[in-house]
Amino acid sequence: MDIQGLNVDLHCHSTVSDGWLSPEEVVGRAHRNGADLLALTDHDELGGLAAAGATAAALGLGFVPGVEISVSFAGETIHIVGLGIDPANAALRGGLQQVRSGRDARARVMAEELARVGIRGALEGARRFARNPNLVGRAHFARHMVAIGLMPDVKTVFDHYLVRGKPGFVEHEWAVLEDAVGWIRAAGGVAVVAHPARYRLSSANMQRLFERFVAAGGEAVEVVSGAHNDDETRRFAHTARVHGLLASRASDFHGDTESPVDVGRCPPLPPDLVPVWSRLIPS
């Protein structure tokens, strides 16, 4: 088997977190786009994996159970993807429940802060876009604000209201990096730093992130990501080489109106890197 040549997408979202499509629809779209191997990685949630896995099996599409865990690090929210996890693992399930427990309170405070600047009813509006009532997040608020005509698109909403220093941003303590990696490893999975170019970290803090990640047992980094341009792909290919990390390839697909890369349509990895899916496909 030509591992390097497979069409692989190891990071995407469904309506179980903040995607636009159901788990079954995401899998079907990836299959139509020619994917050979797909991971569903909803935020802090495992609820879509059974349906996605069953659909993938029916279509003959390789499937990897995954999750994306929210982590607080150096004042930023960092995302750690777990690939090849056992969704029934008690340590992982317990850890994710801890992470999810603060989301509702955070959403309420976000709505209160937005109301202070004249945007009323934001929580009710956000909930209309959230199929999972336990996972109302910034993307749902952004979609509501687009729907009412406040801003033209989700990115503009984030830039004006939902990032640090803006009226709707609410500080929240997510998981500790080492805990998140530990839950993934306890569940038999491979931990991956997701879309590292998105993080507003200094060079020193980025270095510390990878040092702590590797020390905790993290094994991979998303080199190719829907959030990365060509220069950023080259930068994190270098990071993979320096730290001896496996390389992942991912669209981070949420929906066709919000994601620059469609599910199953990722560019290839640089050829000298070892793909993380070499650990996920039985030899």
Image (spheres, grey):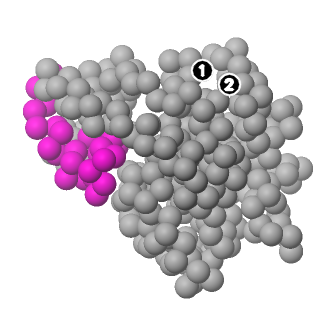
Tell me which segment is drawn in magenta.
117-142
Secondary element at image label 2:
helix
**Magenta run includes residue 47:** no
The residue carrying mark 2 is 209
Secondary element at image label 1:
loop
Instruction: Look at discs 1 and 2 and give the one toward the viewer.
Output: 2
Q: Residue at x 23, y 26 (%)?
A: 109
Question: Of residues 148 and 55, which is closer to you in this image?
Answer: 55
> Percent from the top left, x then y, of residue 134?
30, 47
In the image, residue 75 sits, relative to residue 261, either above or below, namely above
Name the quadrant of the N terminus.
bottom right
Q: Would you say the residues marked 1 and 2 are in contact, meaning their CB atoms lie under 8 Å apart?
A: yes
> Percent from the top left, x then y, of residue 185?
69, 45
Q: Residue furthest front?
A: 90
What number is the disc on residue 8? none
> Percent from the top left, x then y, of residue 101?
36, 37
Q: Tag 2 or tag 1, which sits nearer the N-term?
A: 1
| In the image: residue 161, left or right of residue 254 | left
Three-letter amino acid code at disc 2? Leu
**Magenta run includes residue 130:** yes
The residue carrying mark 1 is 201
Name the quadrant of the C terminus.
bottom right
Question: Of residues 189 and 112, which is closer to you in this image?
Answer: 189
